[in-house]
Image: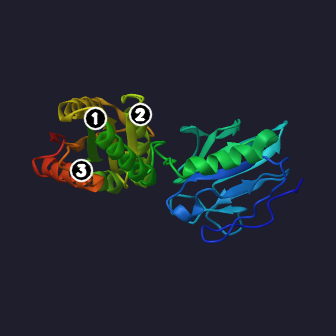
Amino acid sequence: MESEIKTRVTPFSEPHISTESAQDCLVVIYAPSSNQLGKRFSLGEGKVRIGRGMENDVVLNSDSVSRRHARIELRGGGYRVVDMASTNGTYVNDELVDEVVLRDGDQLKVGRTIFKFIVSGNMEAQYHEEIYRLMTVDGLTEMHNKRYFNEAIEREASRSARYGRAFSLVLFDIDHFKKINDTYGHLAGDSVLRQLGALVRNRVRRDDIPCRTGGEEFSIIVPEVSLAGGLNLAEKLRGAIEAAVFKFEGTQIPVTVSMGVAEWTTELTDPQDLVKQADERLYEAKRSGRNRICG
């Protein structure tokens, strides 16, 4: 087993990836820079330092990361993450921590980057499963990503044409999201997106397909549901989001969304035409005062 990670990694370099199945590791599942996704950092017996400074073992070039932010050390038979008096704090499973033992599957957040901790027992299989998941899932919100959305709406349009079944599309985005970032900071903005993702995922049907298709832009493909049903779902979500308490480090952040809803009809031939219809209605909702639905 290696005593430490010997290769320092910047956001623009290839990581040192150990293929030894005996080593636990961290995998990047969300990062502001997409070229970091899926990078794996093997953990050895020494301390692994994470921070903005080039002296760290894992270098995260971001203003939200302190020069010496956190370290991971093998102690008492397990890996512990220790915050090093960082400015913005270290989070494990969205909880602010000073020091905590990492468990298999835990999510470690440093600045805006999220790592997943994978233990060595079945690391290779878990790692490749996580990489496959990253191809279809947004690591921050845990909703499907835009790539998956584009494939799913094509499938749904083909199925609708074949069996004559309706489906609807709900598009929405967060009102004045730039103001949230400017007022509370990008870490708070990320937290709002993460909380919103959890709220939406918990309120849609199993067959519905919620996706994050842009920075603060979301969509839900609603199979076998007409425009009226899509509007009903949209109103339930809009009301739930407005009523929800979004918090970051004890500060409550008001959040509302504007929504556009459209239904696939026999007149349409291209799923992107449906997206365009819903998008036009979304912007109509925004022009009409926001925190509302147009369909």
Asked which secondary structure carries label 2, the reply is helix
Q: Which mark is residue 36?
A: none
* CB atoms of marks 2 and 1 within 8 Å: no
Look at 74% across and 49% down and name the residue there. Answer: 25
Instruction: Locate the C terminus by quadrant.
Output: top left
Look at 85% across and 36% down and name the residue there. Answer: 77
| Figure quadrant of residue 98 | top right
Q: Which mark is residue 274?
A: 3
Residue 9 location, x and y as percent?
69, 66
User: Callout 2: 10 Å neighbours few (<14), some, many (20+)?
Assistant: some
Q: Residue furthest right?
A: 1
Q: Which mark is residue 165?
A: 1
Asked which secondary structure carries label 3, the reply is helix
User: In the image, which is nearer the foreground, mark 1 or mark 3?
Assistant: 1
Q: Nearer the viewer, residue 235 or 114?
A: 235
Report the residue marked by disc 2: 201
User: Callout 3: 10 Å neighbours few (<14), some, many (20+)?
Assistant: many
User: In the image, which is nearer the foreground, mark 2 or mark 1?
Assistant: 1
Q: Nearer the viewer, residue 68 or 127?
A: 127
